[in-house]
Image: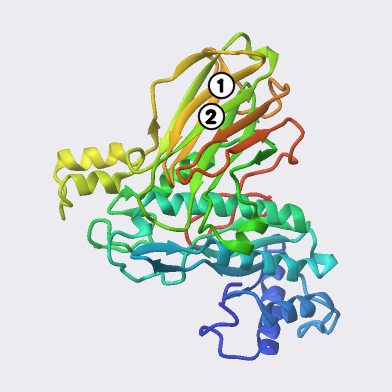
Amino acid sequence: MDASSDGEYWHGTPAEYDELYDYTESALHSVMPKAPLGGPATAGVGSFLTQFLQHCATGKNAVTGATGTRLDLVSFHAKGGVGTAGGNLEMDLQHQLTLHSNGFNAIAAFPQYKDTPIVISEADPEGCAACIETQPSYRTSPAYGAYEVAMMKGTLQLEASLGVNVGGVLAWAFLVPNEPMFAAYRVLASNGIDLPVLSAFKLLGSLQGTSLPVTSSGALTAAQIIANGVRGQADIDAMATLNGQQIQVLVWNYHDILEAVAASPVSLAVQVPASFGAQVSVSHLRTDETHGDAYTTWVAEGSPATPTATQLAALQAAMVPSLLQPDETVAVTADAVNLTFDLPRFGISLITVGPVGKLDAGAGSPEAGRGDAALSVTSGNSSGCACCGCSVGPKGLTPRALLVLLVAMVLLRRRFMG
């Protein structure tokens, strides 16, 4: 039940909201007993959320008079922030992850809700949804996608450390009819052309199977980002999965500040199962300003208000992640595959490694082709700091669905509709 209960949309008292929730729960579940219902979708995290949880846990039900009210999920909103620094647009992942942490801690204080799915029912880089920003904007930039991927990893880390159950992370995005091409509304597509953020989601959504643990000397943990933001060292990190007979590695380069800097050289070493053989196939998909970025293509076309058929075809081709280089066959040396590439700020790479000719084999079966897998990444960033690196081993996270940012208020399919 999303009423932005502590914001301008709810003008009653917290107790009146609790009463409304009790009556809503009673009415809904009398006719749809399996329908998930939760709240309070607070605009941030504070006392309103805590009192609502207390009411559902031990308060008097306004309908039945009994103790407590059924609560299928707990929701709150979390936004980052956008400003300027030195003439550059500056994002604020620190603020959003701080809200995630505060919300998770508030919910974890109620043991009965330890396993209750948490839905961050608005999770966006900023709160101004229907504003048009002066272009260029993060909304038309690969920075948006890199922010979301880094936010997802940080959210998963907080979930694991606090022992809560994140069920969904949603965007309050819009479809604005008759908008100008690439107007910087908070949308995910413009006139049928995907914005670069959707390229990032396509790569993130490609990760399937069993999660492999990742460590990185170039990564900033959720705790570090909450403490200091991403204003100095960039967050160069990765997530990886073992899916059938393929290892997928998603590597990103995120920073809060949108400015032109040199790309970071990355050296990737993937330890592969012996069953992969002496050679493996490697595919490398990329999204950055020259891959999976229709906005840059549109600017190069002269920013046409009404693209021609030829221009539109070029935009459609440019809006999907593309190969950084042709697929290649790479020798396995000492049970590892070694790759090198440059990763620009806000770039995201999806590297897929598998037996020659079998990159797609077993993709639908996470249990197929099991074996030890490990990954390490080293990267010297443009500021000359110490090496950044990642390592992935076979003993990792419990198999689970990755979080995927959805449009509007559509819940993740996991857990809720079964």
- Left or right of 17 on screen, residue 67: right
Residue 43 sits in quarter: bottom right
- Which residue corresponds to mark 1? 338
Mark closer to the chain start, 1 or 2:
2
Q: Which mark is residue 303?
A: none
Residue 417 appears in the picture as rendered? no
Q: Would residue 347 be seen by someone viewing this image from the given angle?
A: yes
Going 38% across and 47% down the picture, which residue do you hit?
261
Relative to 164, is 74 above or below? below
Disc 1, disc 2: CB below 8 Å? Answer: yes
Disc 1 on helix, strand or loop? strand
Quadrant of image for the N terminus = bottom right
Tag of residue 267:
2
Tell me: residue 68, above or below residue 228.
below
Point out residue 198 in the picture as x, y percentages from the top left corner: 42, 47
Looking at the rendered structure, the kind of residue marked 2 is: Ser
The residue most toward the top is: 278
Residue name at image x 59 percent, y 62 percent: 228
Say left or right for 46 vs 404: right
- Coordinates of residue 271 in the picture (x, y in percent): 65, 22
- Picture residue at 73% right of the left edge, 23% below the top: 372
| Left-right relation of 109 to 209 | right
Q: Alpha-carbon neighbours of circle 2 within 10 Å: few (<14), some, or many (≥20)?
A: some
Camera-side residue of 92 and 186: 92
Between residues 214 and 69, which one lies in front from this camera angle? 214
Q: Residues within 10 Å of mark 1 (few under 14, many from 20)?
A: some
Q: Quadrant of residue 376?
A: top right
Residue 8 locus on image (x, y percent):
51, 85
Position in image of residue 289 (x %, y %): 34, 43
Name the residue: 57% across, 38% down. Answer: 387
Q: Which amino acid, mark 1?
A: Asn
